[in-house]
Amino acid sequence: MPELKVKNSMIQVVQGDITKENTDAIVNAANKTLLGGGGVDGAIHRAGGPAILEECRKLGGCDTGDAKITTGGRLPAKYVIHTVGPVYRDGKHGEPELLKSCHVRSLEVAVANGVRTIAFPAISCGVYGYPIEEASKIAINTVKEFLETYPNCGITLVRFVMFGSDTFIPFRSALRDLGGI
């Protein structure tokens, strides 16, 4: 499994099903309503059961680039951190900054809730159309910078869980480009 040690933490890239991750929290690539959708969002809501949707209804949605937390319901993870990625237009309408913000805000929410291990999907790479090669570099670089800046934040593991090889290969390459093995 490709991994990179960063201060007191480890970043990993794996291929698998994020709904089966036994981390403290998993990140949901949600839409602004937080009321479920397709792709990763739909899979998390189905696997986690009605408790997640019930809590999401009370949150009043979420802005693009922000993140909010709920229970994990029936998931192995205790929490779901919902973040809303940008819809990709051409990369010149704030998309890179918003995608970076998704990762930073998710990590900040994780730290505020005592999360030590967290799993991310490929945010915005599905129906939102973000080019996977570019998104993978932003995601991995952002997490690495966060862990370097806050080495004592309590997070020991950040795992990127990619469902298919179409996302796994670019994320693995992005990690290796930073010295991961």
Image (cartoon, rainbow, N blue to C red):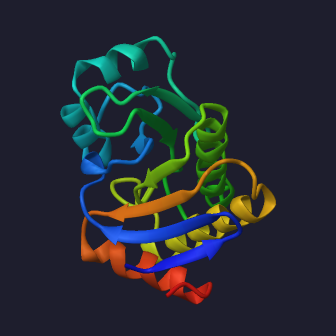
Query: In the image as oriented, which residue stretches furthest toward the right?
Result: 149
Q: Position of residue 166 (x, y in %)?
A: 29, 76
Q: Residue at x 46, y 70 (%)?
A: 12
Residue shown at 47% from the left, 85% from the top: 173
Depicted 85 relative to depicted 33: above or below = below
Residue 180 spot, x, y in % from top left: 54, 84
Residue at image x 35%, y 70%?
14
Image coordinates for residue 125, horizontal then vertical, percent:
40, 61
Question: From where the camera sits, is residue 68 visible?
Answer: yes
In this rendering, is residue 103 above or below 82? below
Residue 105 drawn at (x, y percent):
65, 43
Please identify the quadrant where the N terminus is shown: bottom left
Count how many numbered circles sit on residues in the image.
0
For residue 92, say whether it is visible. no
On screen, residue 77 versus residue 3, left or right, reads: left
- Left or right: 31 in relation to 146: left
Q: Is residue 115 depicted above or below 145 in this figure?
A: above
Q: Determine the image quadrant of residue 52.
A: top left
Up the image or down, 88 lies above or below 44; here it is below
Determine which quarter of the picture holds residue 6.
bottom right
Q: Residue 67 lies in what quarter of the image?
A: top right
User: As rendered, which of 78 and 121 lies closer to the eye?
Assistant: 78
| Residue at image coords 53%, 80% | 175
**Nearest to the observer: residue 163 or residue 86:** 163
Q: Is residue 102 left or right of residue 120?
A: right
